[in-house]
Image (cartoon, rainbow, N blue to C red):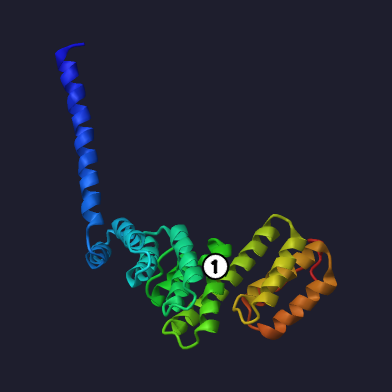
Amino acid sequence: MKISRILAIITVLSGFTLAACSSDDAAKVEENKPVEELYTGAANALDAEDYEEATRLFEEVERQHPYSQWATRAELMAAYSSYKDMRYDEAILALDRFIELHPGNKDIDYALYLKALANFKEDLGPLTALAKQDLADRDAKAARESFENFKELITRFPESRYVNDSRERMIYLVEALARHEVHVARYYLLRGAYLAAANRAQDAIVRFPNSPMHREALEVMVEAYDRMGVPELRDDAKRVMEKSYPKSEYLSRGFRSKQDPWWKLW
């Protein structure tokens, strides 16, 4: 083997050794840090938006000082850091663990609130941004879970500072879930699955009684029952629509049964 090649290998191995030593030295320094300093470092990383490092350091606080008051707080902050880093599944797992281990903690309401936000799969920010988003086109299961989290928070902690915001988000979620149901119903209608379309539209009306999506759901029901050749149910849905939405554009266009021959004018 040539001397130059041997020297190159030694250089590479030395680099690995130095890197390992450097990592070990950093770990030893970290191990020797007082818990207050370790927690402050995690908080600083969070402020600097280095969420991965913040999560790691908060987890170090818990690992090195498992029975301290710092550890309990660090568990929640590690979950928050994961949430800010858009690692929502990790955040939810951490929050579930926190809620299970510390059921009487003063921050349980916040843990539920954060879990509800994590189930949205994004940081919604101010409520004014909600109008720009439509959960109807996204994962309805996550939206339902988020709704249940907010509901649990309001039920268990009616005096929580997060209650008002949670209620507003629940209203938005209900409307979004209703839109989702109607979108699915329309999809079935377009695919010719008329019974499924009618059932899904009816389900949206029953499950979300105060939703503004009722008009569109009734439109789907009228169309679906008509295409199935069930005039009784079609006319029932149409009567409800005429009573509830007399100025509906759908009605003003003039409904014509798809069952009628093309030449029939009356």
Q: Quadrant of the N terminus?
A: top left
Quarter of the view holding residue 201:
bottom right
Q: Quadrant of the C terminus?
A: bottom right
For this rendering, which residue is in front, 11 or 265?
Answer: 11
The residue sitting at the bottom extreme is: 159
For this rendering, which residue is in front, 220 or 184?
Answer: 184
- Disc 1 is placed on an element classified as helix
**In the displayed structure, does residue 264 sit left or right of residue 25?**
right
Residue 56 x/y as whole percent: 32, 56
Q: Would you name the residue on which mark 1 appears? A: 143
Quarter of the view holding residue 176:
bottom right
Residue 51 x/y as whole percent: 31, 59
Would you say residue 106 is visible in this rendering?
A: yes
**In the displayed structure, does residue 213 sit left or right of residue 117?**
right
Instruction: Name the residue: 42% across, 80% down.
Output: 106
**122 vs 109: above or below:** above
Residue 96 x/y as whole percent: 50, 66
Amino acid type, residue under disc 1 in the picture: Ala
**248 vs 13: above or below:** below
For this rendering, which residue is in front, 214 or 151?
Answer: 151
**5 vs 182: above or below:** above
Residue 94 x/y as whole percent: 45, 63
Instruction: Name the residue: 55% across, 78% down.
Output: 152
Instruction: Name the residue: 32% across, 70% down.
Output: 70
* Total numbered circles: 1
Would you say residue 121 is visible in this rendering?
A: no
- Alpha-carbon neighbours of circle 1 within 10 Å: few (<14), some, or many (≥20)? many
